[in-house]
Amino acid sequence: MARLFGTDGVRGVANTELTPLLAMQLGAAGAYVLTEEHSYRPTIMVGCDTRISGDMLANALMAGVCSVGANAVYVGVMPTPAIAYLTRKYKVDAGVVISASHNPVEFNGIKFFNGDGYKLSDEMEDRIESYIKEGNKSLPQPNGSRVGKIKYRRDALEEYINHSMRQIKTDLHGLKIVVDCAEGASYITSVETLRELGADVIAIHNNPDGTNINSNCGSTHMEELCARVVMEHADLGLAFDGDADRLLACDENGHIVNGDEIMAIIGNHMKEEGTLEGDTIVVTVMTNLGFILMGKERGIKVEQTKVGDRYVLERMREIGASLGGEQSGHIIFLNENTTGDGLLSALHLLEVIKMSGKKLSELAKIMEVLPQSLFNAKVPNHKKETYMEYPEIKDAIANLEKKYAGEGRVLIRPSGTEPLVRVMIEGKDQKVIEKDARDLADLIEQVVF
């Protein structure tokens, strides 16, 4: 049996790979492992995004929770960062989100937060998985009054909205914003929050029907949003993904502003305000070189980690950083929430726009985005970690590193989830870096196979 947990919980096609049975087993094993040291009856909060399989999997998972004597609180459709916050706010013992984030409707996922609102460690996930592999046979099976129960709560959204609004120092009157909700979990929270703060909001893709989540919309499909911003003469556009833990934007001219640029804008503002802890921002190795150069120019330290928001978070906690994230739009404000939060990212970006009086296009000039080219080399899964053992590959990489020294970057890394070696090159000339990245990816495929 392959490892169930990936970099962001358990994912798969709902009802075939991620079955109700597996959801029930995860609920039972997760509830037990997360709360086994407690002498009282523990409580697990459960929420989901808008995809049609959410209720099926949530109810199966909660049945598992109750089967080991824990209680469940079902809050329904809720952004992932809301569950992380509310788990701490309501002092429940753990939180679970049923979501596959930016993936198509046929997929779903299950991710856990501990009682402090943080994603689980590898060790904790391995313990949960060990019970599932044995069929949960050694878990308790209480009966009678010791079986858990489910409580349905529909008022939790308002608490998350209020918390989010409290994090900025200004209203948003005078801003006209197009918001793409991805037919996902932000369709209420983002629109209500922005309107409550006084913005003129034009909401698109905010009518989820269970089957249209992320369908040609949201942060992975921004063409319609960019066009609508220009047509409406709006100040900017905001794009969430299905579970609203990431945010991308487009400026008044319809040009996309990615996560690196958003972090640069907000981070520089936080430094000026004295709220950027250690004058440091934590990012991944995939962050654009222009971001690192921006940091040097403005006295901001840039810490880099492996790809994945969980690694960004780990490093933030280690060094006490208050801001970190990824180019994809996962941005963490650690003094305000314990995971990537699209709504908080939007509010802090809008705060800078409002307080500075500048257009987003002007603010985005804080960093120069150097061209990047990414190609995937398909290799056998058991060989993806050993590509540097081949002399011709090692020599080719060394030659490219020499070529781009001082004016670019070469980054080669095995995929954490697929049988791929990813080749990324940054430089000044898009055509040149594309050719070099493609040639190196082709070489890796030919040699490693």
Image: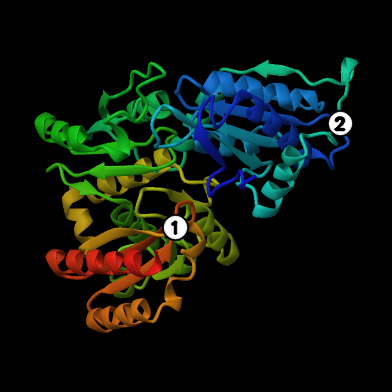
42 lies above or below 405:
above
- Determine the residue positioned at 25% across, 74% down: 408
Q: Earlier in the sequence, mark 1 or mark 2?
A: 2
Horizontal side of 120 relative to 305 (left or right) equals right
Residue 162 visible within the image:
no
114 lies above or below 304:
above
User: Tag 1's secondary structure?
Assistant: loop
Image disc number at residue 191: none
- Determine the residue positioned at 70% across, 49% down: 126
Q: Quadrant of the N terminus?
A: top right
Q: Position of residue 174 (x, y in %)?
A: 22, 34
Residue where numbered disc 1 is placed = 415
Q: Nearer the viewer, residue 80 or 61?
A: 61
Few, some or many residues within 10 Å of mark 2 (<14, 14–19, 20+): few
Residue 406 visible within the image:
yes
Q: Position of residue 303 (x, y in %)?
A: 45, 69
- In the rendered structure, which amino acid carries the disc numbered 1? Ser
Few, some or many residues within 10 Å of mark 1 (<14, 14–19, 20+): some
Image disc number at residue 140: 2
- Determine the residue positioned at 30% across, 49% down: 352
Q: Nearer the viewer, residue 393 or 259?
A: 393
83 lies above or below 50:
below
Horizontal side of 296 relative to 110 (left or right) equals left
Q: Nearer the viewer, residue 181 or 61?
A: 61
Q: Position of residue 158 (x, y in %)?
A: 51, 24
- In the rendered structure, which amino acid carries the disc numbered 2? Pro
Q: Position of residue 77 (x, y in %)?
A: 50, 23
Q: In the figure, residue 284 lies in which quadrant? A: bottom left
Q: Nearer the viewer, residue 438 or 122?
A: 438
Q: In the figure, residue 323 lies in which quadrant? A: bottom left
